[in-house]
Image: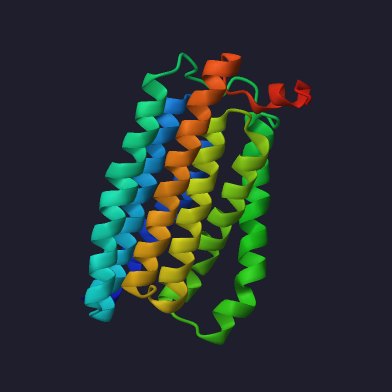
Amino acid sequence: MNENVYVEGLNLVCGGLLLSAVLILWRRELSAIVRLLALQGGLLTVLAALLGIHERNGDLLLVAAGVLVLKVIGLPAVLRRVLQTTTEDRESEPLVNVTASLLAAALITLAAYALSRPLVALAPSPATQALPVGIAMVFLGFFVMITRRRALSQIVGFLILDNGISATAFLAAAGVPLIVELGVSLDVLLVVLVLQVLTARMRLAFGNTDLDELHELHD
């Protein structure tokens, strides 16, 4: 692969990953958030494939196929199934409003670039220079989990965090062994399925999935 094409493609994909995380903070419609999460999974697939082709690493291409199946098809399908069983289609009252969330996203991204400078300096390359994107996604995933009130939104935050960890691994070390990525992906799928069951039980017991209302419960 031509080096210029590789660098431009890498920058475009990483920019798309970061933008998708910010857009998830911006949107309140849960169906749109799930679509953005699927798009983020697709960009992560392209990132793994791009690095695999550039590094001539067959394992990374297999990982890209696994990411496609799990994060573009599997997990979004599970989340859409949850949406079909509920009348809650919006994150109505996040703890931080949209404007403040976008401002926080900008500060988080700047912090990620500042914190990752020593890591980039260790082995400068086009991939490691994009490392702040993965770290920013991890922080943004934490931010979504902390500030959103709906259980589904918090699941999305967890998945953004996981995507950030995967992107960081791809960029920092040209990926991880296939068996490790497979094990982690299956763990993530299991966690999401468990959270889906818990969300359904919350809805049956309390009528919605607003986690703040659980603060009123006592033994």
Query: Does any portion of residue 27 appear in the rendered image?
Result: no
Picture quadrant where residue 57 is located? bottom left
Q: Where 75 falls versus 152 (above or below)? A: below
Residue at point 51% right, 39% down? 155
Q: Position of residue 54 (x, y in %)?
A: 26, 76
Residue at point 45% right, 42% down? 192
Label total for image:
0
Query: Does any portion of residue 67 appear in the rendered image?
Result: yes
Residue at point 44% right, 17% down? 86
Q: Quadrant of the N terminus?
A: bottom left
Q: Position of residue 91 (x, y in %)?
A: 56, 24
Q: Nearer the viewer, residue 30 or 13?
A: 30
Q: Where 117 falls versus 110 (above or below)? A: below
Residue at point 40% right, 38% down? 36
Q: Residue furthest front?
A: 219
Q: Position of residue 207 (x, y in %)?
A: 57, 13
Q: Quadrant of the C terminus?
A: top right
Looking at the picture, the colour scheme in use is rainbow
Q: Where 183 falls versus 139 (above or below)? A: below
Q: Position of residue 33 (x, y in %)?
A: 44, 33
Picture quadrant where residue 113 is located? bottom right
Q: Nearer the viewer, residue 21 or 57?
A: 57
